[in-house]
Image: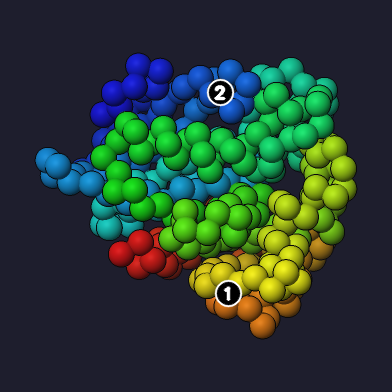
Amino acid sequence: MAENKALSKVKSQKVLGGYVEKYIHTSSTLGGLKASFNLFIPHLADGEKANVLMFLSGLTCTEENFITKAGAIPHAAEHKIFLLCPDTSPRGAGCPEEDENWDFGTGAGFYVNATNQRYSKFYNMYDYVNKELIALVNDNFPTSGKISVFGHSMGGHGALISYLKNPGLYATASAYAPICNPCLCPWGEKCFGGFLDSKEEWAAYDATELVNAMKKEGKDMTANILIDQGSADGFLEKKQLLPENLIEACKGTSITLNYRLADGYDHSYYFIQTFIKDHIEHHVNAMK
């Protein structure tokens, strides 16, 4: 049960002995706008604490998609972990062009901190998910302090960069069909070009470029990443995802990248459902 008066519970539904609860709060990171998230709270004994697994959703999604469609709750209940599901962007910011296209702005925050002054007050989803939201959940729920992160498509991109940019914060990362090299794909070029002031800033939010920069600087990090990709994913063919670039970048590093190409699967939540057990177990094992 949340204690912070600034955190308002608007929905609570019992499932598998625990609860899916929806909360709204005023976000300082997102310019004072209201932000929503869903949280699966497993059944815990008095005084018991649980680890947190955060899922970052893709383009057009909200905090509702994963928690209702992915089939994750039975596995989270079995392993007694919190499932944290934030929204994908600020809502109602009133920024230019934010509602004109499905792949930029509302529902498409791309997990960056905007530097373009037209968006910089509100579009700071990187800091929101990696700082403000984690602190809020740890302050208000019986968490262990251990957290891990995964995501899908744009959210897979968000999970990968969050993990790579914050050594020691997350136990591991995994992703479904992530945007692996946004600097070189149409989605990334559109969002980075809109949210960020200069092209020099793009690489700081690109998993492939982050790994390449580590190699160039002689740095390394021991990491273990799981990626599932469907072979029938239309966005793979359209060169929006570019997993081959991340695979190549990870060669010669201490990053273990388990990349699995699943025959016949597309970009949908049916694909996510199929491999959800594997991903949750990947994170549970890393948080032990």
Residue sitting nearer the eye, 250 or 245: 250
Image x and y of residue 277, in percent: 40, 64
The answer to whether mark 1 and mark 2 are in CB contact below 8 A is no
Image x and y of residue 28, in percent: 56, 23
Residue at image position (57%, 78%) is 254
Q: Which mark is residue 226?
A: none
Going by the picture, which residue comes out furthest to the left? Answer: 46
**Which residue is labeled 2 in the image?**
28
Mark 2 is on which residue type? Ser
Residue 284 visible in image: no
The image quadrant where one finds the C terminus is: bottom left
Image x and y of residue 150, in percent: 52, 55
Residue at image position (80%, 50%) is 202
Binning the other alpha carbons within 10 Å of mark 2 as few (below 14), some (14 to 19) or many (20 upward) gives: some
The image quadrant where one finds the N terminus is: top left
Residue 126 visible in image: yes
| Sequence-first tag of 1 and 2 | 2
Residue 27 higher or lower than 160, as above or below: above
Spatial CA span between label 1 and label 2: 34 Å
Mark 1 is on which residue type? Ile
**Which residue is labeled 1 in the image?**
255
Residue sitting nearer the eye, 234 or 138: 138
Left or right: residue 17 compared with residue 192: left
Residue at image position (36%, 53%) is 146
Image x and y of residue 99, in percent: 76, 26
Residue 175 position by quadrant: bottom right
Q: Secondary structure at mark 2?
A: loop
Binning the other alpha carbons within 10 Å of mark 1 as few (below 14), some (14 to 19) or many (20 upward) gives: some
